[in-house]
Image: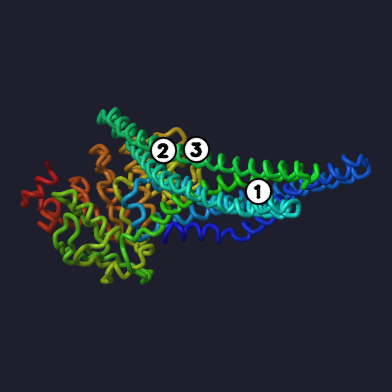
Amino acid sequence: MSGRDVLARSVRGQGRRVALGSALGCVHQLGEAMVPVLIGVVVDQAVAGQDAGRLVLWLAVLAVVYVCLSWSFRLGARAGERGAEEAAHTLRLAIVRRVVDPRGGAGDDRLSGELANVATEDAKRVGAVNMALMSGTWAVAGIAVSAVALLLTSVPLGLIVLLGTPVLLWLGHLLSKPLERRSEAEQDRAAGAAGVAADLVAGLRVLKGLGAQQAAVERYRRTSRVSLAATLRAARAQSWQTGLVLALTGGFIALIAWVGGRLALEGSLTLGQLVSAVGLALFLLGPLETFAWVNAELAQGRASAARIAEVLAAGPAVVGGDEPVPDAVRGQLRLRGVRLGGLDGVDLDLPAGRLTGIAVTDPACAEALLGCLGRETDPQQGSVELDGVPLTRLDPAGLRAAVLVAAHDAALFEGSLAANVHPEEPTGHGQRDDPRTERAMAAADADEVARSLPRGAATEVGEGGRSLSGGQRQRVLLARALRAEPPVLVVHDPTTAVDAVTEARIAQGLREIRQGLTTVVVTNSPALLAVTDRVVLLDGGRVGAEGTHAELARTHENYRTAVLT
């Protein structure tokens, strides 16, 4: 999808509102153009002739015209603004759907703050194109009505408008090109700055612990300066474009007024006609200024549309897979010759209904394994199967419900602790009414976290769970994964931030609550590995050893090094 396609979709989606707003705007412009014409008629027929009756009549006509143009403008502007906002909203939904698509790929090379900027500022600018198109239609109608009125008043004046307006529009289009380029650069830099800011805020606690706040501030300052420079360049381009267009427009209006004055001196125009001609020339300033604004909006809209198109057209991280996941999932996982990242031809069987521990000598192996099991990415070679069916054949959305990979760095959401464990939980103490939620929280020792909070599980945890400690966040995340009750659960380092006593309780709780369900624990924690049915050591990208924790700790040196030191 190209930026042009994004713009076209935005306008088509609001076609009826654009048409309605354009029609009402044309009525408004007709009324605006008729005002100087009627004033000229009043001068010729009422003022010059000193006819009070005609003066009252024409003033009444003017009043009616003012009422019509006022209401048509209000209703047209309302339709335009609504069309712009709804188009932006539709684009935001499309961007969000693409980002959260189970096949992934849209956010791989972009920071979360950058994606947020695309979904907000860029979507707003593209939505505003609907209003710009309506305003452009209004301006065309205003110029057309003015040209006809001037032709009926004076052929030379009408020809000046008809021949001069296309030239002005062409020059305005040329002057908008630098703005379009610089607007795109501005949005790129602004999105980058927003992404860095969001990244820093998310890791603020870690930065404080490392004493790296100053380095983080300097990084953001550099990014912000680059963004500021791009914004200033775009602002200069816009000011030059606006200034030059206004100068050209002013010269055009002055030419009309000068020609009208000469015709009046020669007697070709009456006093009323001269007033009408000058009034129409001044009225033209509005539509021509509108064209300058429309050019700027379209330039910025095209730049933003190109950025949105990049997100919407991003290729998926995984392809294929439309076969539904069976309702009854036994939960047997099998890897055959898997090569990806640190994995080097891994053959591995994870039996159904068992608790399996996987220890690694290289963290890259853990990341690659989690990516394969959750189908965040497909192996470069080999295959991963669920109950004998390759994951590449299964629908990714259904697969994620059957095989839940709970990463250790998953995010908590703003809201209560209970709502973070299970979204359908009430905001109060309602988690005690659901035994499944209560069991999950107890198994993850998250019930102890709830007891330590002022309002228990109803306590708001803040954005990203910032009101909780690292260990508390880990327990809430594990409780969320356990509460989901997936047929297959893969957890990664769920206890790295808790003390040894708490870790032992969590290990026992995990074993009990997942009894009879397929569970894989990717960790080097002795407490967790000790409660598993079987442990697999990934060493050098391959399966280096298998057995119970006690057996491997007694007989395998690399296992002891990875787990016990």
Q: Earlier in the sequence, mark 3 or mark 2?
A: 2
Amino acid type of the residue tagged 3 in the rendering: Ser
Circle on res. 233: 2
Amino acid type of the residue tagged 1 in the rendering: Ala
Circle on res. 77: 1
What secondary structure is found at the residue carrying circle 1?
helix
As measured in the structure, the alpha-carbon distance from the residue carrying label 2 to the one carrying label 1 is 31 Å
- In the rendered image, which quarter contains the N terminus? bottom left
Q: Is residue 367 left or right of residue 546?
A: right
**Residue for point 18% across, 46% down:** 526
Up/down of 282 relative to 98, above or below: above
Residue under circle 3? 239
Q: Earlier in the sequence, mark 2 or mark 1?
A: 1
Q: Is residue 27 left or right of residue 555?
A: right
User: Residue 113 falls in which quadrant of the image?
Assistant: top left
| Residue 66 visible in the current orientation | no
**Residue for point 29% across, 34% down:** 206
**Crowdedness near tag 1: few (<14), some (14–19) or many (≥20) residues, C-alpha within 10 Å:** some
Exactly how many numbered labels are in the figure?
A: 3
Mark closer to the observer (2, 1): 2
